[in-house]
Amino acid sequence: MRVLMLSWEYPPVVVGGLGRHVHALARHLAGQGHEVVVLCRQPGGSDAATHPDSETVVEGVRLVRVAEDPPHLTFERDLVAWTLAMGHAMVRAGHRLLAGWRPDVVHAHDWLVTHPAVALAEAGGVPLVSTVHATEAGRHSGWLSHNHNQQIHSVEWWLAHRSDAVVTCSAAMRAEVATLFELPPERISVLRNGIESCTWEVSPAEVAATRAEHAPGGGPLLLYFGRLEFEKGVQDLLAALPGIRERHPGATAVIAGRGSHENRLRDHAAECGVSGAARFTGHLPDVALAALLAAADAVVLPSRYEPFGIVALEAAAAGAPLVASTAGGLAELVEDGRTGATFPPGEIDLLADAVHRVLTDPAAAAARAHAARARLATDFDWRTIAAATAALYAGTPRRDHAPLPRPKIATGNVLGRTP
């Protein structure tokens, strides 16, 4: 099949799990004989003079990258306007592409590419498939309180209703999308994220050096890695750390990653009296992260909202014991007592209890980590996921779409959640 994917991130432009998902899916589809074109963007903060439009073939995937237009728009300050401008650049590049090449299907990844995906699917007269990787309401605990929240939600609603097929990465996300956008659940397909087969080879000397650096007192070493945003729940790990240290003196928590919540988390660590025990490292290169995963006594994923949880797969691939909340897709990835230790999201005391279970019985924790790793080859193999995605493409007809009204915006909590 000829597949046109649209994504606002694609390596080396990676913000979160979406970029890694699209990268892996595109490569594996191409490896299975499909002709894949990915329409994406150049790095933010650049323009056509420094990073002009480009077209390359990388790992069997044809990449068409669009430059930012001249207007002074930034992602952080002008999110919706910036997104519309990116979409306009993608539409122009897409029309040039369609002059000599026609896809069999257009696949949109998340709301930021809604406008160009709809325009190009209509111009090509082909089905539109969309993957909803997360929702604005979900990220904000069910609330759509501000104008930009409502604007983003309405674009998500449009994409879901305009698509000929909708995909989510977990059953939890399927239920969320069906509720938020009033879609029949049977119209939504669940195609999980996967993980590349890889080996994490770290020498004993590297492990010892990492432990000496981050747990110099010899106490237990906990690790969180990922984006530093409120929905990731790192504040709950920091709040639980004093209680963990009471039962396990000298315990430290390494917080690896970047995000808009970082300064608040640093302040929160000080408020909890654990500034010296919480080490913020920023983004780590793969080699340093691999060493930390090998050195950690537990990887803690305290998400309050998690559509899937690729980091849980990465921790499992490294053989690290997992402590995870049951938020969203994490509940489908980490099974309490079999592949990790779990706790309800936002429950500080139960988070501390789950960590305590891991630290007091390392043998049982290692057995669970082994089970989690063994599951990867069967349940999260990208080759299987790509084949299932291609089957979805082939089985999705182009439907006639009536004009859509503007969606109603709920004034209360649309998911019935507490912050």
Image: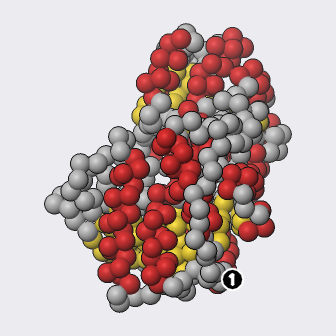
Regarding residue 221, the answer to whether it shows in the image is no
* Residue shown at 77% from the left, 64% from the top: 184
Left or right position of 2 against 322 = left
Q: Nearer the viewer, residue 249 or 229?
A: 229
* Residue shown at 76% from the left, 45% from the top: 331
Q: Nearer the viewer, residue 211 or 233?
A: 233
Task: Assign a secondary structure to mark 1.
Answer: loop
Q: Nearer the viewer, residue 214 or 400?
A: 400
* Residue shown at 44% from the left, 87% from the top: 102
Residue 345 to residue 195: above or below? above
Q: Residue 406: percent from the left, percent from the top?
A: 57, 57
Residue 14 to residue 387: above or below? above
Q: Residue 192: percent from the left, percent from the top?
A: 67, 61
Regarding residue 183, the answer to whether it shows in the image is yes
Count of all numbered marks drawn on residues in the image: 1
* Residue shown at 33% from the left, 58% from the top: 85
In what quadrant of the picture does the C terminus appear?
Answer: top right
Q: Quadrant of residue 129?
A: bottom right
Q: Residue 193: percent from the left, percent from the top?
A: 63, 60
Q: Residues within 10 Å of mark 1 (few under 14, many from 20)?
A: few
Q: Quadrant of residue 374?
A: bottom right
Q: Amino acid at mark 1?
A: Gly
Residue 54 to residue 148: above or below? below
In what quadrant of the picture does the N terminus appear?
Answer: bottom right
Q: Residue 380: percent from the left, percent from the top?
A: 68, 61
Q: Which residue is mark 1?
A: 395
